[in-house]
Structures are given as C-alpha cells and as structure tokens.
Image (cartoon, grey):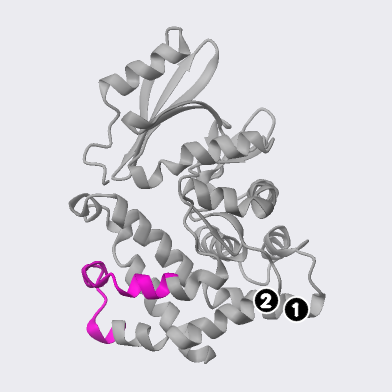
Amino acid sequence: MTMQNPLPDAAALAWALDILGTESHAAPVVSTPWSSVTRLSNAAGVFYLKRTPDDFWIEADILRFCGAAGLDCTPELIAANRARGCFLMKACGDTTLRDYFAGTADIDLLCSGIAAGRRIMAAAVDKIPALIALGVPDWRVRQLPEVFAHMLDKTALLEAEGLSADDRRQLQSAARPLAAACARLDAFGIPDTLCHCDFHDGNITLARGTLQTGVIDLGEVALTHPFFPLLSLERRLAGRYNIAAESAAAAQLRGACFDGWDIPAKDAAPLREAAASLTPLFFALAHIRLCEAAPEEELRKITRMQGRIRDALRETAALLTDAA
C-alpha cells in the first residue's frame, strides 16, 4: 500500500490523545510521502504519533523488539493501531545530532550515536528468524544475489529512475561478480544483523540534559551486513562535515564504526574493501523500498531523491566490474 495522504487524520490523532489521557499540545513535525510525525506534549512528557504505509509499519514491531531487548536507545512504543497505520511512542531525546550541531560536528557525540546503532545490531544477531517472521526485509549477504536478480526484474522502476538499457545490461553482467563479492564478504564471518538503512546524524537523537544518544526512524531497516550502514554513514558524515580522510576525527569515527568486530588485524582492510564493493547496492535497495512505498507523483517533488538509485546502481556495476 502506498500512502495517499501522509497527514495524520482526525481519528488517528483522537486515538493518540485518548491514550495519553490528558490535555496535550499537538504540532506537526514532518510529513513525507512515506510518513508523517506529530509531536504531542503534555505534563507527562513528549510523545510522537507516527503514521506510515504498510511497507514501513514494521517500525512499530521493531520498537517493540528493541524494548523487549532492554535497549534504552530507541523510542518506547506506547501503543499501535494497525487499522489506521499509526503508532504512538515516547520521545527518545529532544533533538537530532544534525540540528544540535548546526553545521559543526562533535565527534564524541557522533561516536556515541554510532555506539547506540551498534547496540541495536548486537541485540539482533541471534534473533534473525524472529525478525524475518516480523517481515524485516532479508538482504543477508548470502541472499543478495537473489535480491539483486529480483531488483533487475523491476524494469519500469529502473527506467523511471533514469537507468538506460545499457545501464541495465551492465547490471545484468554484474550478476556473477556480485555473487563472488558476496562470497568474499561472507568468508570474513561477520554475521548479518538488523541494520538501519538510513543511519545518519539526522536519525540519531540527543537528550541535551544527559547527552544520551538514541536512534529513530526504525521502519527503514533490513537484515544485512553491519558494515553497509556504517560505511554509508562514514561517507555521509565526511561529506556533510568536511572530515578529511587522514584526520584524527576520521580515525575516531572509523574506530567507532569498525573496531571491536573480533577479526584479525590483517583482515580489517580487506573486509572493509569487500563490504565497500556492495554498499552502493545496499543504498539503492533502501531507496527502491522508499519509492515502492510512496506515490510516484509525490516522490518526483523531492529533488534530493532524484538520481540516487541510478547513481548507486551505476556505482555498483562499476565496482563489481573492477573487482572481477
């Protein structure tokens, strides 16, 4: 189901206010083709009402999973209403790192946010069957060749995203190198887990009073290799905050992302290289999922989305061809 009207309807808002059981001030926070969020504040604190299409309803289940796992770095699920595609959650922090930084990054806080994301990954490693049963997309490394083949069947979507017939032929030719790249990455023995597909400073929260960080927007998740979101995050942070590759800040961020995975030192660089060859595919799959959940005419209005899938898949084909 795509979401034709992302704004919370009156009945959904009334449902949330009834649960809170006290007078609350409601204010819209964000509205996109695939979700809407309303802030509800009262004497008991701050809460958020979120409405999603079916494809991202999984967020309510993921919040429930994180709560059951004892994680304190995600919003607390208060209630969910599947019929209206909405759920109510307690605030996790009072700002995002991106807003808090206002253009100047605090590397220690970024590392704290990365640690929060890795705690979610760690909690899910041995829960894969249960997460598959919940409907979390299965992009595990051994499944990626099949996922890739299925993606290539989405001809209309790929054409709409600007991929030419030649682009699609190059992707078809990349199928065998992709399988080899997946085998190389799998051989390092890092287990697949629950990964945030849009892990960045805008989805890491901060409680300004305690400086505790958390992670939000957990509808955009998949079961896959943990280095994919971490490499993507590292790249995005470097671009947004002009972090030079050889700087102390970059080294600190790399440590937060890639230290502590229980691998021999000699394997660290080859492992990163193997994961990096597949990370653009992860990025493309995440954006395809967004596109399939939202009305096309609404997506076309978001200029920052234009060309992302095309560029990521062209990069995928180039990397895999070079590695072959």
- The region drawn magenta spans 147-167
Residue 197, magenta (yes or no) = no
| Depth check, front residue: 106 or 319 | 319
**Residue drawn at (54%, 17%), measured in percent from left and top?**
45
Q: In which quarter of the image is residue 82?
A: top left
Amino acid bearing label 2: Leu
**Residue drawn at (49%, 23%), measured in percent from left and top?**
47
Label 1 vs label 2: CA separation? 6 Å
Residue 107 visible somewhere in the drawing: no
| Depth check, front residue: 90 or 201 | 90
Amino acid bearing label 1: Asp
Q: Where is residue 80 in the image (x, y as percent from the top left)?
A: 44, 28
Location of residue 116 with respect to 11 vertically, above or below: below
Q: Name the residue under label 1.
A: 267
Mark 1 surroundings within 10 Å by alpha-carbon count, few (fewer than 14), some (14 through 19), many (20 or more): few
- How many marks the image carries: the answer is 2
Is residue 313 found left or right of 132 in the rendered image? left
**Residue drawn at (34%, 43%), measured in percent from left and top?**
54
Q: Position of residue 94 (x, y in %)?
A: 55, 30
> Any mark on residue 271, and which?
2
Location of residue 264 with respect to 75 vertically, above or below: below
> Any mark on residue 315, and which?
none
Is residue 219 found left or right of 238 in the rendered image? left
Q: Position of residue 192 (x, y in %)?
A: 62, 62
Mark 2 surroundings within 10 Å by alpha-carbon count, few (fewer than 14), some (14 through 19), many (20 or more): many
**Residue drawn at (51%, 45%), measured in percent from left and top?**
203
Q: CB under 8 Å between callouts 1 and 2?
A: yes
